[in-house]
Amino acid sequence: MDVLSDVIALMRTGRARSARVEWQAPWGQRFPSVPGSAGFQVVLQGSAWLLPPDGEPIALSVGDVVFFPHGHGCVLADSPSTPVAEPECDPLDDGLGLFASASIDGPATTVLLCGGYRLDPGMAHPILRELPDVIHLPARLGLHAELRAAVESLGAEIRHPRLGADTVVTSLLDMLLLYILRAWFTTEPGHCEVDGWAQALTDPVVSVALDAIHRDLAHPWTVEELGARAGLSRAAFSRRFSTLVGRPPLAYVTWWRLATAARLLRASGAPLGEIATEVGYGSEFAFANAFKREHGMAPGRYRREVCPPAVFSSRE
């Protein structure tokens, strides 16, 4: 897979949640912090205000997307002066289900699409760790067309579920997360840091190498080969990669191989030798030694102590 798809596959766990909520002015709602998650709010109708704990209120209009990559809570209201209602509304509440919808008596002044994703904090990739606490993607004419399409489709499916809606909504939630991140990294350069992963993903040299690594993790990569693909000498490529990614090229390859192996151990019952081959190790012994250095325990023990019981029992 490509870099961004790989990162989401590594960190996503459980099932995403979503809800379509209608509000009638005056209204004010607090959404709590949920550690180990990422949440979003989208204005489908009307307008709203995002009231951060620090800083000025942010006006939101139809089509605006607000994303909270680190699970921080927020307050939304029809006006900065409206009192905030209690209790808090948790979009990741298991009681919400996949198609939760809350309505009011009378015409709605604001309709929000809210939801969240559960993330494994132990599998945090620097791409997400470097993101700001709040990402606001305004609905600008001509920008983020695929994001707008996903939002509209998701809102319609939640409001009127039809045959196959369970699969459609699940897929749309995953698409929405990828589109939000794509929009931030590729069309919001003025908001991104001048270095780090925000630049690495769009750098014409480093992005080529990252894409090659993520698409063929089992390949016996060398710095020379990665540099040749990127069009630079070994030394120049290594310096540029290390500056933006934060690790030397082969150190990143090793780290990503072992992070991917941990995901495979948690998510499947594949034999250790098969996983070793898939992530680029020539023997189960070499894989086990490398895995222990990175994760502090052997792969077999990791499976027994970290994997969900259903996955572990599938190998019995």
Image (cartoon, rainbow, N blue to C red):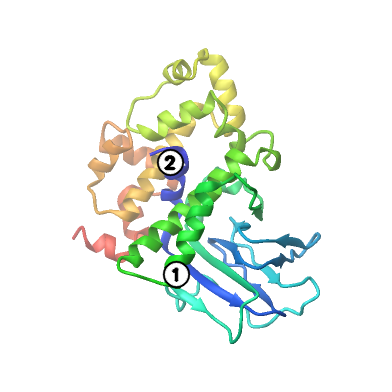
Q: 49 above or below 11?
A: below
Q: 135 above or below 161?
A: above
Residue density around tag 2, few if under 14, some if 14–19, many if 20 or more, within 10 Å = few
Q: 295 above or below 117?
A: above
> Given the image, on which type of amino acid does mark 1 rest?
Ile
Which residue matches tag 2? 293
106 relative position to 165: left or right: right
Which residue matches tag 1? 158
For the point 62% across and 28% down, which residue is it? 243
For the point 66% across and 54% down, which residue is it? 136
For the point 55% across and 67% down, which residue is it? 114
Closer to the chain start, of discs 2 and 1, is 1
Any part of residue 124 in sight: no
Q: How many callouts does the rendering have? A: 2
Q: Position of residue 38 (x, y in %)?
A: 55, 59
- Which image quarter is the N terminus in? top left
Q: Position of residue 128 (x, y in %)?
A: 56, 48
